[in-house]
Image (cartoon, rainbow, N blue to C red):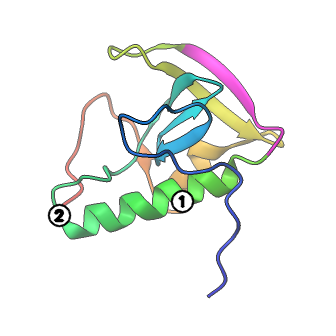
Amino acid sequence: MMLAALALSLCPPPPAKRVTCVVDGDTAWVNGEKIRLANIDAPEIRGKCSSERALAIAARNRLATLLRPGFQIHRTGTDRYGRTLARITVDGVDVGRVLVVEGLAREWTSRREPWC
C-alpha cells in the first residue's frame, strides 16, 4: 500500500514548540495559532482503547495529507480552551467533512461520545 506524502508535518510532543503542524485529526497549529476544526470530533491519540488510538493516528495522518499548500482557514470563534475554531478548506472542499465521510471523524454533537 502506498502512502500519500504529508503536506504538513506532524507536531512533536510537548514541550516542543509547535508552529505549523498537525496534532491529531481535529487540531493543527498554523503559524503559531492552534486551530480546532469546527463541527467534527476525531478520536484521541491517547484514547481509551487500541481501536480508538489506531483510528486517531489514521485521522491525524489523513489531515496532514489534506492540508496541502493553499488551504484556507475560515475562523468561527474560539473554544473554551482558547483554540481558534475554524473550517479549513482546500480547493473549496471542507477537510473536516472529508474526514467524516471517510469514517475518520464524526460530526460534533456538542458533547463527547466514546470511541471504544
What residue sits 71% from the left and 53% below the top? 7
- Say above or below: 41 vs 4: above
Q: Which residue is mark 2?
A: 49
In the depicted view, which residue is nearer to us: 40 or 44?
44
- Say above or below: 3 vs 1: above
Q: Residues within 10 Å of mark 1 (few under 14, many from 20)?
A: many
Residue type at tag 2: Cys
Give the position of the N terminus as an image quadrant: bottom right
Residue type at tag 1: Asn
Instruction: Name the main secondary structure of what is drawn in magenta.
Output: strand
* Residue 115 appears left or right of 43: left
Does the stretch in magenta take in 42? no
Helix, strand or loop for disc 2: loop
In the depicted view, which residue is nearer to us: 21 or 72?
21
Query: In the image, residue 15 lies at what x, y percent?
Result: 36, 34
- The circle on residue 41 is none
How far, Cα to Cα, is label 2 from label 1?
19 Å
Does the stretch in magenta take in 72? yes
Q: Which residue is mark 1?
A: 61
Furthest-bottom residue in this view: 1
What residue sits 76% from the left and 48% below the top? 68
Query: In the image, residue 17 lies at what x, y percent?
Result: 48, 31
* Residue 7 appears left or right of 115: right
What residue sits 69% from the left and 26% below the top? 73
Numbered marks: total: 2
Q: Which residues are magenta?
A: 69-76
In the depicted view, which residue is nearer to us: 109 or 96?
96
What residue sits 33% from the left and 34% below the top? 109
* Residue 51 appears left or right of 27: left
Query: In the image, residue 20 lies at what x, y percent?
Result: 62, 35
